[in-house]
Image (tube, rainbow, N blue to C red):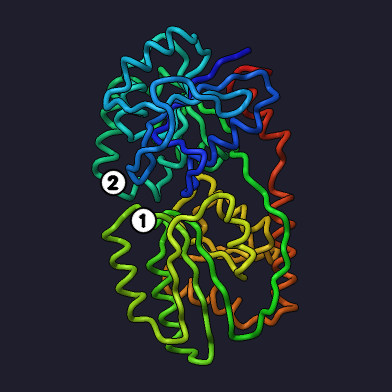
């Protein structure tokens, strides 16, 4: 059986933020019948720095084809090297680029094993525009080591491959293997009336997710259309406290016909129910290399308002949602479109969203992409 080490800073079975953790969990689950044993090496702390209630410094069973090592050490390199020598994996799969312990150290100092670096959307122009100076400086330093020629790289679609080639060079060895999504059952939207709308967002609260222009758009709509009533539910942990304080200042100044409720993080088991209580999903991210919450919302029959910086495009042509520019005016127009709909019209969009999700995913093709990347043709 082939062995693969998976390095990721945070990996809690009950993790509530999505992103790479959800992508990794999908890979571990879907590739269980492919003759691969995964060894996930991660911190014993969650993204919010809270210590997980798990055994540390030992391999803990996750499922039949995966074990997890929760490390409490500030320097994981000696332990990681020791376990790699003992387990003799065929590949080390590194999630991300910028974490010192779980990305940079393994990239630079783990030798004599094939490394695959999953860039997780971090080379997307939108992602590189955040803290741009630090990221560009870091990537230039890595290029001096020749890392782009010494390692293989993982991206999730052809567009992300283009972005990666721009930073790594056309000769870099890049594999395309899409993320495994979790698809929900379709649930009908009930009780929709013209002028009323229940919006929902699920995602970390940070500038990348673009909550602020959504809130400003809602303020504009509320002032122009006092007859509207929009209820906006936000689910997600606060990743950027300063950004959240700016968002809260806008929330405090919203008209009375606009209601915004922050629910904090949502457990994975509760996401489907949260979606069923709302009409339309909104998350106009600057960029997403996948966007688990977006495809999950679509699968549940919730039309999506998002940007053009995600893999989920051409939504309006199929009535699955709206791809919008990320300025206040464009987002306001998209929200108003759904706010004015009656039940029957929104039901058409709802069914189209569910169809879009199911036509966009081919699990067998995804499995083949991972088999190619891990050399299991």
Residue under pointer 2? 132
Measured as percent of width and height from the top left, residue 301 is found at 69, 62
Q: Residues within 10 Å of mark 1 (few under 14, many from 20)?
A: some
Measured as percent of width and height from the top left, residue 317 is found at 68, 64
Give whichever of 134, 11 is nearer the camera.
Answer: 11
Q: Is residue 12 visible?
A: yes
Which residue occupies 45% across, 12% down?
A: 113
Residue under pointer 1? 238
Q: Is 319 left, or right, of 14 in this rendering?
A: right
Q: Earlier in the sequence, mark 1 or mark 2?
A: 2
Q: Quadrant of the N terminus?
A: top right
Circle 2 SS class: helix
Dividing the picture into quadrants, the one containing residue 156 is top right
Give whichever of 21, 315 is nearer the camera.
Answer: 21
Measured as percent of width and height from the top left, residue 102 is found at 36, 28
Q: Quick check: 217 above or below 44?
A: below
Q: Is residue 166 visible?
A: no
Circle 1 SS class: loop
Q: Is 280 left, or right, of 92 in this rendering?
A: right
Measured as percent of width and height from the top left, residue 101 is found at 31, 28
Give whichever of 283, 44 is nearer the camera.
Answer: 44
Which residue occupies 47% across, 60% down?
A: 235
Q: Quick check: 375 above or below 163?
A: above
């Amino acid at each position: 059986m082939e062995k693969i080490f998976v390095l990721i800073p945070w990996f809690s079975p009950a993790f509530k933020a999505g992103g790479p953790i959800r992508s990794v969990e999908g890979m571990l689950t879907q590739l269980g019948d492919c003759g691969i044993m995964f060894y996930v090496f991660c911190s014993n702390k969650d993204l919010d720095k809270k210590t997980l209630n798990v055994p540390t410094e030992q391999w803990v069973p996750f499922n039949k084809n995966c074990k997890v090592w929760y490390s409490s050490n500030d320097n994981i390199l000696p332990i990681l090297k020791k376990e790699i020598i003992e387990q003799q994996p065929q590949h080390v799969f590194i999630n991300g680029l910028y974490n010192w312990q779980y990305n940079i150290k393994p990239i630079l100092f783990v030798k004599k094993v094939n490394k695959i670096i999953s860039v997780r959307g971090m080379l997307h122009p939108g992602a590189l525009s955040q803290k741009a100076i630090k990221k560009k400086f870091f990537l230039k330093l890595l290029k001096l080591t020749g890392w782009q020629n010494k390692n293989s790289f993982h991206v999730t679609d052809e567009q992300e491959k283009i972005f990666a080639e721009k930073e790594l060079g056309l000769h870099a060895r890049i594999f395309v293997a899409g993320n495994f999504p979790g698809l929900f059952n379709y649930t009908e939207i009930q009780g929709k009336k013209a002028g009323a709308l229940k919006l929902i967002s699920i995602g970390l609260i940070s500038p990348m997710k673009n909550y602020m222009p959504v809130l400003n758009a809602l303020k504009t709509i509320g002032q122009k259309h006092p007859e509207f009533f929009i209820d906006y539910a936000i689910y997600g942990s606060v990743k950027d406290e300063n950004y959240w304080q700016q968002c809260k200042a806008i929330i405090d100044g919203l008209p009375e016909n606009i209601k915004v409720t922050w629910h904090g993080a949502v457990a994975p088991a509760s996401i489907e129910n949260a979606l069923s209580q709302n009409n339309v999903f909104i998350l106009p991210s600057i960029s997403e290399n996948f966007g688990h919450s977006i495809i999950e919302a679509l699968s549940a029959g919730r039309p999506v308002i998002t940007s053009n910086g995600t893999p989920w495009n051409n939504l309006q042509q199929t009535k699955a949602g709206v791809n919008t520019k990320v300025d206040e005016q464009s987002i306001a127009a998209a929200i108003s479109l759904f706010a004015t709909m009656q039940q029957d019209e929104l039901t058409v969009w709802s069914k189209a969203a569910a169809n879009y999700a199911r036509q966009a995913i081919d699990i067998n093709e995804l499995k083949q992409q991972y088999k190619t990347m891990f050399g299991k043709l």
